[in-house]
């Protein structure tokens, strides 16, 4: 062709060791330019920017790694790659599957990065129809000796997580060949393909081109993975979830993250989710997962009709607990019951330590920021995201049960539920201690709503916890620390400075209702209700010892009683912390010169008596309180700024300190 007139419409089929396009025009969805000007130095070249109904699988030389031990002293000269594909709508029994061969689109030259120097194999790519699912790969590697004679051709099958491709998307891949296995992994799919144009370098989050390294013991058994990328983490989850019996060794594989992981690199399934939780209800994860202080971001789970949702679905079984530690997760999790930001369901003496959820969590019953339903140990974990559920909703755990423990776990996000929402735990049950856990977030519910726990039940304990967030409910049993304290349970050395508001009955600064034991607690938060409310408890029918109250807000709306209603005419040891002139008096003695009668001293005395009255068996030892109240040096200035007559400040007069101090 010659001349300078533009070519406006071409129907053509072009090959450059592959099909480039079947139809091209200068208008519409794509354009094609062929240089025909005899005076143009680029004469004979062409370029295209075309949308295409197909998808491209692409493997570039820089993403091919061949282990030296696999070549065994020879050089690799040729590589062929084939994929097993199921077409869109094809039968899962494999009758519709076919094999697709990759074409080489660049010359063999240069050197392939890796552990040895090998001739490059060129860029390999294949075009396949949208909606097809890539099931597996097969690699054929030709090895030569120094004389250029072919000495062997090795066929190496590859396993991969199935991926369904989309139209007009490119799927960059990496390939690693080792003596024991071969792997293909996908990076993030890219849209708006420009078939035929010079393409930019594709970069992924891989470290040294590998998604994970195997960890082996002294006898060469694989004990775990070190994971570097989203593809590697997804591969680990798929491997664990492939277990067919509860004794499978893969359920106990350890995993350590060596980098931050961005799951947004992964494609989404038909639910809009890019993550399948590690461990199922039938086959829970039982290994040690160490996040290494790294963050997994971009997690999306959107399965509102499925339970056991979270980064982990279920961990631990009887006799085989799991450990999850040093991990931060960011994203969104939506499930049904047993849904959590880190773990949906934790059982059987498992441990969750130093983990943080920064994403939003939404479920029905048993929904928690860290764990949905917990029967294990949670220590030094944080939740900063929003948590929304129906029954049993908590900032750290929705349901805490069976002698499980929650220790030093702050919650700063919001909790919204119906029955039993709590800033730390929605429902704390069956001899389960919550210790040194602050809530500074908002809690909203309809019944049994608490700043720390919605319900403290069945010999469970809440010790050295505090709430500074707002607690709001439209029903009954609303408390700054617990909505209800019931059935031989205890609340010891806790305080509330947050606002507690209800439109129902039994509303208290510490507990909405107390049917058990509350010792050495105080509240300075505002308490507002329409029926039966008090500075410490809305209702008391049991033992309430050495507690103080001092509520703020307009004087006309303050409770006039420390206890709204005392059914059994029990006279508890409870006092207002106001002096006779209405000035808050936490540090002034009741008797001049008698420092032992200050509220702070009396609270600590009550803690000492409480500890001394306990026995030595394991159940009693769980109730020991190693914390004492100390003066908050910021309180006096805050009170002075607030001024009379309301002295409205949320600054706590007394803080908790561990003895001996940490």
Image (cartoon, rainbow, N blue to C red):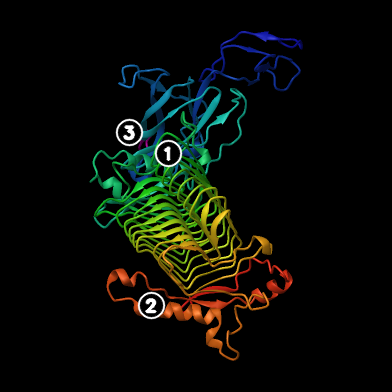
Q: Is residue 423 above or below residue 655?
A: above
Q: Residues under labels 2 and 1: Cα distance? A: 41 Å
Q: Please tell me which residue is depicted at 31% across the width and 38% down the height of the picture.
A: 242
Q: Is residue 358 above or below residue 606?
A: above
Q: Is residue 658 above or below residue 120?
A: below
Q: Residue 79, percent across and down?
A: 41, 31
Instruction: Tell me where the magenta segment starts and ends, as one range.
Output: 144-158
Number of marks in the image? 3
| Structural crowding at the residue carrying mark 1, measured as other residues with C-alpha within 10 Å and reported as few (<14), some (14–19) or many (≥20) | many
Q: Please tell me which residue is depicted at 33% across the width and 22% down the height of the picture.
A: 92
Q: Identify the residue under disc 1.
A: 336
The front one of 20 and 250 is 250
Q: Residue 587, percent across and down?
A: 60, 81
User: Could you tell me which secondary element the residue under label 2 belongs to?
Assistant: helix
| Structural crowding at the residue carrying mark 3, measured as other residues with C-alpha within 10 Å and reported as few (<14), some (14–19) or many (≥20) | some
* Magenta: main secondary structure: strand
Q: Please, which residue is most extreme toward the front here?
A: 569
Q: Which of the two discs, 3 and 1, labels the residue nearer the N terminus? A: 3
**Can residue 242 be seen here?**
yes
Q: Residues under labels 3 and 2: Cα distance? A: 68 Å
| Structural crowding at the residue carrying mark 2, measured as other residues with C-alpha within 10 Å and reported as few (<14), some (14–19) or many (≥20) | some
The front one of 47 and 312 is 312
Which one is in front in this view, the residue at disc 2 or the one at disc 1?
Answer: 2
User: Could you tell me which secondary element the residue under label 3 belongs to?
Assistant: strand
Q: Which of the two discs, 3 and 2, labels the residue nearer the N terminus? A: 3
Q: Please tell me which residue is depicted at 63% across the width and 68% down the height of the picture.
A: 651
Q: Which of the two discs, 2 and 1, labels the residue nearer the N terminus? A: 1
Q: Which mark is residue 156?
A: 3
Quadrant the N terminus occupies: top right
Q: Identify the residue under disc 2.
A: 611
């Amino acid at each position: 062709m010659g001349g300078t007139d533009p070519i406006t419409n071409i129907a053509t089929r072009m090959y450059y060791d592959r099909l480039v396009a079947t139809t091209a025009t200068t208008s519409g969805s794509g354009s094609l330019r062929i240089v025909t000007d005899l005076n143009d130095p680029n004469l004979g070249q062409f370029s295209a920017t075309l949308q295409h109904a197909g998808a491209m699988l692409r493997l570039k030389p820089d993403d091919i790694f061949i282990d030296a031990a696999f070549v065994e002293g020879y050089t690799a000269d040729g590589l062929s790659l084939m994929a097993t594909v199921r077409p869109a709508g094809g039968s899962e029994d494999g009758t519709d599957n076919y094999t697709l061969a990759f074409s080489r689109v660049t010359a063999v030259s240069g050197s392939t990065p890796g552990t040895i120097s090998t001739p490059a194999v060129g860029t390999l790519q294949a075009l396949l129809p949208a909606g097809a699912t890539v099931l597996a790969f097969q690699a054929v590697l030709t090895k030569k000796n120094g004389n250029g004679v072919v000495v062997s051709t090795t066929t190496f099958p590859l396993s991969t997580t199935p991926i369904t491709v989309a139209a007009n998307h490119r799927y960059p891949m990496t390939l690693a060949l080792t003596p024991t296995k071969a792997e293909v992994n996908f990076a993030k799919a890219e849209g708006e393909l420009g078939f035929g144009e010079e393409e930019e370098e594709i970069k992924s989050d891989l470290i040294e081109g590998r998604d994970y390294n195997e960890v082996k013991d002294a006898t060469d058994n694989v004990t775990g993975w070190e994971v570097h990328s989203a593809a590697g983490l997804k591969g680990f989850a798929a491997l664990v979830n492939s277990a067919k019996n509860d004794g499978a060794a893969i359920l106990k594989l350890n995993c350590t993250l060596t980098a931050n992981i961005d799951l947004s690199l992964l494609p989404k399934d038909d639910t809009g989710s890019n993550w399948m939780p590690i461990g199922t209800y039938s086959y829970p994860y039982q290994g040690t997962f160490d996040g290494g202080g790294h963050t997994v971001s971009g997690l999306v789970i959107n399965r509102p009709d499925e339970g056991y949702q979270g980064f982990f679905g279920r961990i631990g079984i009887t006799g085989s607990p799991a450990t999850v530690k040093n991990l931060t997760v960011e994203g969104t999790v939506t499930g049904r019951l047993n849904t959590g930001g880190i773990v949906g369901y934790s059982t059987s003496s498992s441990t969750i330590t130093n983990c943080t959820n920064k994403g939003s969590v939404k479920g029905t019953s048993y929904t928690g920021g860290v764990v949905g339903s917990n029967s294990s140990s949670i220590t030094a974990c944080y939740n900063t995201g929003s948590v929304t559920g129906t029954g049993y909703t908590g900032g750290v755990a929705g349901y805490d049960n069976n002698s499980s423990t929650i220790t030093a776990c702050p919650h700063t996000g919001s909790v919204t539920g119906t029955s039993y929402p709590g800033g730390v735990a929605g429902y704390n049950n069956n001899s389960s201690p919550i210790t040194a856990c602050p809530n500074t977030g908002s809690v909203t519910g309809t019944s049994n709503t608490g700043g720390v726990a919605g319900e403290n039940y069945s010999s469970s304990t809440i010790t050295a916890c505090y709430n500074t967030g707002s607690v709001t409910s439209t029903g009954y049993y609303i408390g700054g620390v617990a909505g209800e304290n019931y059935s031989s349970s205890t609340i010891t050395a806790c305080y509330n400075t947050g606002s507690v508001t209800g439109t129902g009955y039994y509303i208290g600064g510490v507990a909405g209702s107390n049917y058990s034991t509350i010792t050495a607690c105080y509240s300075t938060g505002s308490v507002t209700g329409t029926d039966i409310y008090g500075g410490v408890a809305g209702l008391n029918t049991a033992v309430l010892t050495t507690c103080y109250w001092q509520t703020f807000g307009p004087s006309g709306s303050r409770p006039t009683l420390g206890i709204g209603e005392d059914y059994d005419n029990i006279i508890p040891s409870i006092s207002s912390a106001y002096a006779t002139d209405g000035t808050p008096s936490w540090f002034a003695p009741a008797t001049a010169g008698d420092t032992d009668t200050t509220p702070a001293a009396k609270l600590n005395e009550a803690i000492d008596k409480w500890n001394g009255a306990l026995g030595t068996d394991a159940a009693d030892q769980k109730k020991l309180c190693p914390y004492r109240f100390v003066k908050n040096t910021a309180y006096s200035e805050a009170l002075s700024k607030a001024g009379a007559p309301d002295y409205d400040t949320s600054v706590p007069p007394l803080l908790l300190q561990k003895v001996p101090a940490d």
